Image (cartoon, grey):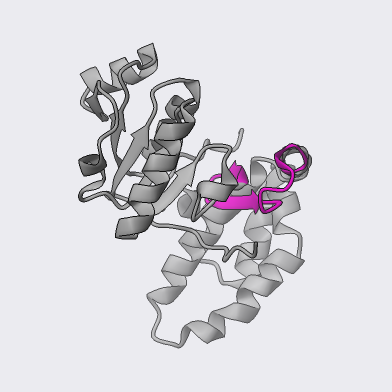
Amino acid sequence: MRYYPVNLDIQNRRCLVVGGGSVGTRKVGTLLECGAMVTVVSPLVTEELLELSDSKTVKLKQRHYQTSDLTGMFLVIGATDNEESNWRIHADAERIGKLCNIADRPEVCNFILPSVVKRGDLLIAVSTSGKSPAFAKKLRKDFEKEFGEEYADFLHLMGAIRKKLLLKKHEPEVHKPLFEKLINKGLVDMIRENRKEDINQLLHRVLGKEYDFKSLMGKEKGMKVPPLSE
């Protein structure tokens, strides 16, 4: 099997999770993190899902799966321990062309979920195409050690710089060598080591005096990146 790698935008898209156990709960959590509108179908659910339902964060249907549950859904995840139900979900999704993942059953999925390292906006996805989830997990842990939280701060900063540069009246291609200089001059290392003066000197040298580290780090709204220590 050859998979086509892709990152899906599921912000405000309707997604279905069939199964309310620990696996289903984890799947719901990931979907919510990405801004999906989640519906859960399961006769039994965890306390966490009940709380999410009570707070109107997810829509909960405490019953068994029905084919009609797929109506209007962008994608469906099957997370039940019933093989017959999983195959039915798969068959229904295939028939009407829905994205479908059945937990731990790559043979009945039209997409699989990689093991992921998250550092702010940095996503590193690891997949063995379903051949060895254990090895994918091992690689993920290795990457987690190599790529620390400084990469979240780094991308926060680079996003703010890019936004400010785009306000100027010249082609975006002009920006490429500027970003390459920032990267090649060790900006990530400076952030990791909290060397604020060195960061500012680099920004001023490459971009100009109007690019200040502290003000740039405060410009990207909606980012949940903790400030560097004083």
**Residue extending furthest front?**
84
Q: Residue shown at 36%/35% (left/top)? A: 17
x%, y% of residue 79? 45, 32
187 or 2, which lies in front? 2
Q: Is residue 198 visible?
A: no
Give 75 or 35, whichever is nearer the viewer.
Answer: 75
Residue 230 drawn at (x, y percent): 61, 33
Front residue of this view, candidates 125 and 72: 72
Q: Residue furthest top?
A: 47
Up-down relation of residue 24 to residue 222 (above or below): above
Quarter residue 2 falls in: bottom right
Query: Going 33% across and 49% down the picture, which residue do you hit?
Result: 92
Residue drawn at point x = 25 percent, y = 36 percent: 66
Q: What residue is at 21 percent from the left and 48 percent from the top? A: 71
Q: Is residue 87 magenta?
A: no
Q: Nearer the viewer, residue 53 or 64?
A: 64
- In the rendered image, is residue 60 in sight? yes
Q: Quadrant of residue 61?
A: top left
**Residue 128 painted magenta:** yes
Provide residue 105's location: percent of width, then percent of height: 57, 41
Q: Position of residue 55 (x, y in %)?
A: 23, 21
Image quarter of the N terminus:
bottom right
Which portion, as a residue range, is magenta? 115-136
